Amino acid sequence: MKKEDLGFFKNLLTDRLKELLSHADSTVTGMTKPKENFADPTDRASHESDRTFELRIRDREHKLIKKIKKALVRIENETFGICEVCEEDISLQRIMARPVTTQCIDCKTREEDMEKALGI
């Protein structure tokens, strides 16, 4: 992969990481506020549902943060853009669509087909 492309993806991933970390900080701040008292049980249930939904989103973002950090390490190690399975170059279109990817489209498709067959 060209140096310009690596620089582009490093900046893209670094910016995304900063954005995700700021979301995490705001969630923690929001969760430490004193509990609200709701007179109506429906309001309480709605509030709890909203909090649960937000925590699920943050959990997914936490997993993405880990993947971004690993992608940044691969950029530093100059292995970014190389499939971990077949060791061929991953297409630029695939990396643009999913910058944290570790597999080319063919290897990922085979993996997903195997998971479907095994019922995973």
Image (tube, helix red, strand yellow):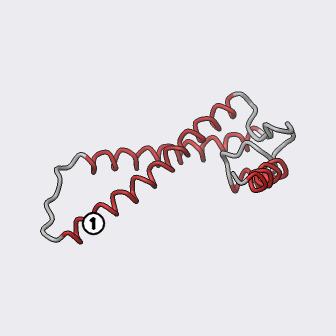
Quarter placement of the N terminus: top right
Residue 18 image offset from top left, x and y in percent: 47, 44
Q: Secondary structure at mark 1?
A: helix
94 relative to 73 in the view: left or right = right
In the rendered view, tell whether residue 55 sits above or below residue 72: below
Residue 105 image offset from top left, x and y in percent: 81, 52
Q: Residue at x 12, y 68 (%)?
A: 39
Q: Quadrant of residue 66?
A: top right
Q: Nearer the viewer, residue 18 or 109?
A: 109
In the rendered view, tell whether residue 15 sits above or below residue 3: below
Reading the image, the residue beneath label 1 is: 45
84 relative to 36 in the view: left or right = right
Residue 96 image offset from top left, x and y in percent: 71, 54
Count of numbered badges drawn on the protein: 1
41 relative to 65 in the view: left or right = left
Q: Nearer the viewer, residue 42 or 119?
A: 119
Residue 8 image offset from top left, x and y in percent: 66, 45
Q: Nearer the viewer, residue 102 or 9?
A: 102
118 relative to 73 in the view: left or right = right
Q: Residue at x 78, y 48 (%)?
A: 111
Q: Quadrant of residue 11?
A: top right
Judged from this view, the residue extending furthest toward the top is 77
Q: Amino acid at mark 1?
A: Ala
Q: Residue at x 34, y 63 (%)?
A: 49
